[in-house]
Image (cartoon, rainbow, N blue to C red):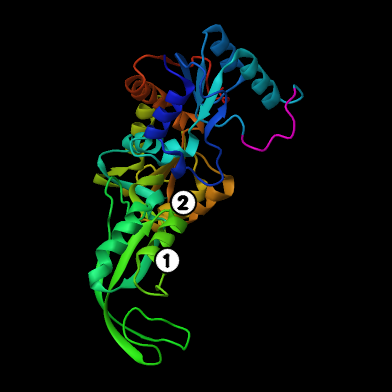
């Protein structure tokens, strides 16, 4: 039977939590990992109406795009709406997983879906997510005589250094000319104390995780022929990912007017109205988007050459700044820019969890209405 832990793994494969914004609260927020998750409900917002629907439907777990726990809780009682929701979830034995900005950043996730409604073209993130593979957190550098390099490399590899993906013993060795002058208390492996020695060496470099670092250095020292082996540990920076991150900027295959963009957005999101700031006849070759409230990316979008920006909602003064910069803004509403992705997420989870029943909440809706 599908368990909550299986749901967590499936969501992690779709939307890696490491790529979420650092201010966000993603992952398993409520529930036991060993509990069953045969019946799963998807929603944008976890409201009291959605909870009541889930209880009636016998749901085991809810994937709530927006995290129902965002700010730290000092108490869990029924004096707040969040407290009442949490008590209701716990009482019903319903787990909650929230992907939020991890799903925004992921390739094929929420933002790519939103971008696909703007037209064909080449899309890339506005702000790239970074990856730091655990095995590549550091680089260990040492200098060793050529005849000993295999022994040192093998010892470090056995201790966990040199792992890149599924490859082990990964290293680089470069010819090096070293010098040393041993003091009175030294016992050099080559040459003699008190004399400047010149030695032909190899510069050996291997990546290493933080966890394996101490053991790899100890193995290096044990296998190295020198009395005082040179050891340099260099922390490695994370790497930007070409297809993951916040927002998207799209270079369209053909220019489009604001009026045409409005029509595309309405059709893609299934809405009758959107708010627009900009001239209907303006032409756009580069456009950008961000689901939800993407005003913080407006400057990045402008710097990327975008002349139109689609997001759910934006502060009044950000809209004024966009107008002053000549950037057209399209605002369909916060959750209207997100909810249409839930059927796609449902289908992807159904593939990853073939033993479960996955539904999209019918009670989840925008809190706004047009009158």
Q: Is residue 42 magenta?
A: no
Q: Is residue 273 above or below residue 182?
A: above
Q: Is residue 74 above or below residue 60?
A: below
Q: Answer left or right for 91 relative to 344.
A: right
Q: Residue at x 32, y 51 (%)?
A: 163
Extent of the magenta region: 70-77
Quadrant of the rendered image containing residue 16: top left
Q: Residue at x 46, y 39 (%)?
A: 17
Determine the CA span between mark 2 and mark 1: 15 Å
Provide the residue designation for mark 2: 211
- Most frequent secondary structure within the magenta stretch: loop
Q: Is residue 111 visible?
A: yes
Q: Foreground residue, 291 or 83?
A: 83
Q: Are marks 2 and 1 in contact (CB under 8 Å)?
A: no
Q: Which quadrant of the rendered structure holds the N terminus? A: top left
Q: Can you name the residue that lies furthest to the bottom here?
A: 195
Q: Secondary structure at mark 1?
A: strand
Classify 10 Å Cα crowding around label 2: few (below 14), some (14-19), many (20 and above).
Answer: few
- State the mark number for residue 234: 1
**Precedes in sequence: disc 2 or disc 1:** 2
Q: Is residue 277 visible?
A: no
Q: Answer left or right for 50 relative to 306.
A: right
Q: Foreground residue, 52 or 315?
A: 52
Q: Is residue 75 magenta?
A: yes
């Amino acid at each position: 039977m599908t368990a909550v832990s299986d749901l967590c793994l499936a969501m992690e494969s779709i939307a890696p939590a490491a790529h979420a914004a650092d201010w966000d609260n993603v992952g398993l927020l409520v529930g036991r990992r060993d509990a069953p998750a045969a019946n799963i409900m998807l929603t944008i917002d976890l409201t009291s109406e959605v909870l009541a629907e889930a209880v009636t439907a016998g749901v085991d777990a809810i994937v709530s795009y927006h995290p129902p726990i965002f700010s730290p809780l000092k108490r869990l009682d029924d004096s707040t709406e969040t407290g009442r929701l949490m008590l209701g979830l716990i009482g019903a034995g319903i787990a909650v997983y929230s992907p939020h900005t991890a799903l925004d950043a992921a390739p094929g996730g929420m933002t790519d879906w939103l971008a696909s409604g703007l037209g064909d073209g080449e899309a890339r993130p506005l702000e790239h997510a970074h990856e730091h593979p655990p095995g590549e957190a550091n680089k260990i550098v040492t200098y060793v005589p050529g005849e000993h390099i295999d022994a040192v490399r093998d010892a470090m590899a056995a201790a966990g250094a040199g792992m890149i993906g599924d490859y082990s013993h990964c290293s680089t060795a470069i010819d090096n000319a070293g010098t040393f002058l041993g003091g009175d208390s030294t016992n050099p492996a080559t040459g003699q104390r008190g004399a400047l020695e010149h030695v032909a060496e190899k510069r050996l470099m291997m990546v290493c995780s933080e966890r394996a670092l101490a053991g790899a250095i100890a193995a290096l020292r044990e296998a190295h022929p020198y009395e005082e082996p040179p050891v340099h540990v260099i922390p490695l920076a994370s790497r930007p990912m070409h297809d993951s991150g916040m927002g998207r900027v799209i270079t369209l295959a053909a220019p489009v007017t604001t009026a045409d963009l409005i029509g595309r957005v309405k059709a893609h999101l299934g809405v009758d109205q959107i708010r627009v700031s900009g001239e209907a006849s303006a032409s756009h070759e580069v456009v950008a988007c961000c689901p939800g409230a993407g005003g913080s990316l407006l400057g990045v979008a402008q710097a990327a050459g975008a002349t139109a920006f689609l997001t759910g909602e934006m502060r009044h003064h950000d809209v004024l700044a966009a107008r002053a910069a000549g950037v057209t803004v399209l605002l369909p509403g916060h959750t209207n820019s997100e909810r249409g992705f839930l059927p796609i997420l449902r289908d992807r989870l159904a593939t990853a969890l073939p033993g479960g029943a996955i539904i999209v909440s019918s009670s989840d809706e925008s809190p706004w209405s047009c009158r």
